Amino acid sequence: MAIRRQHAPVLRFAAIFSRHPVAIDWACARAAGQWGTVIHQTPDLDFNQTDFYHEAMGIGLKKRLVAFKQLIDPFELVESKLQSGRWEDEYQSVFDGPESRAVNIDPGYVSEAKVVLATMKDRDHRLYLGEGVFGEITLYFQLPGRWVPSRWTYPDYRDDDYHAFFHACRTELRNRMRHPPNENRTDA
């Protein structure tokens, strides 16, 4: 019989996009308030690889990727997706603009081997995780040190800026797994 092992912790991130910088800032602050310190983030990147969101969110969208310090169990991805949906609804309830969706918050995680996104949409390449949430392996890591997209990878996740962000996240994760903080150290 195979030996059952607990999965190594992973680094949570969120992809937050809107055409309103104040909405992106609000979502980042809300996520940091719940998920902890932001350790890596991109500048607001143009999100113009698709027009899928134009009807609900307008044009001129920007996306910011943010990673959080606290390592999590991959199982927490389900609650992260449900929580981000509640935040989107919360912001929409006070938003005074024409868009039916002012901000989109997509959580995911980075492991040593892959980038996983949470989604509420079922497709052939997604696994059901529970409570209406699916997980998609969007990128996988291949030696000698590059992120590789799959046939279904969203166009923006193929971009070098995204790969640089995920490389920094993976490096952070690996460093922390090799050298976990010592709770008893006085110089920490």
Image (cartoon, rainbow, N blue to C red):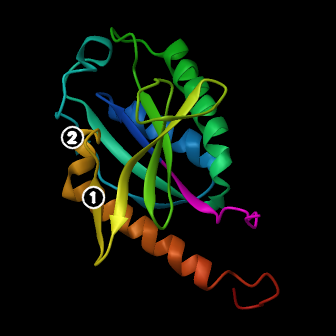
Magenta stretch mostly in which secondary structure?
A: loop
The furthest residue to the front: 1
| Residue 143 in sight here | yes
Question: In the picture, which quadrant includes the C terminus?
Answer: bottom right
Could you tell whether 143 is left or right of 39 in the image? left
Q: Position of residue 119 (x, y in %)?
A: 48, 31
Q: Amino acid at mark 1?
A: Val
Q: Quadrant of residue 62?
A: top left
Could you tell whether 74 is left or right of 101 in the image? right
Find disc 2 in the rendering and name its residue.
Answer: 155
Find disc 1 in the rendering and name its residue.
Answer: 148
Q: How many marks?
A: 2
Question: In the picture, which quadrant includes the N terminus?
Answer: bottom right
Mark 2, other Cα within 10 Å: few <14 / some 14–19 / many ≥20: few
| Residue 46 in sight here | no
| Front: mark 1 or 2 | 1
Q: Position of residue 154 (x, y in %)?
A: 27, 39
Question: In the rendered image of this protein, does residue 171 appear above or below residue 63?
Answer: below
Question: In the rendered image of this protein, does residue 25 appear above or below residue 55?
Answer: below
The magenta stretch spans residue 102: no
Q: Quadrant of residue 49?
A: top left
Q: Nearer the viewer, residue 9 or 85?
A: 9
Q: Position of residue 53 (x, y in %)?
A: 28, 20
User: Which range of residues does the magenta coloring cover?
Assistant: 1-13
Mark 1, other Cα within 10 Å: few <14 / some 14–19 / many ≥20: some
Q: Amino acid at mark 2?
A: Pro
- Secondary element under disc 2, as helix, strand or loop, is helix
- Secondary element under disc 1, as helix, strand or loop, is strand
The residue lying at 46 percent from left, 16 percent from top is: 95
The residue lying at 76 percent from left, 63 percent from top is: 4
Spatial CA distance of label 1 from label 2 is 12 Å
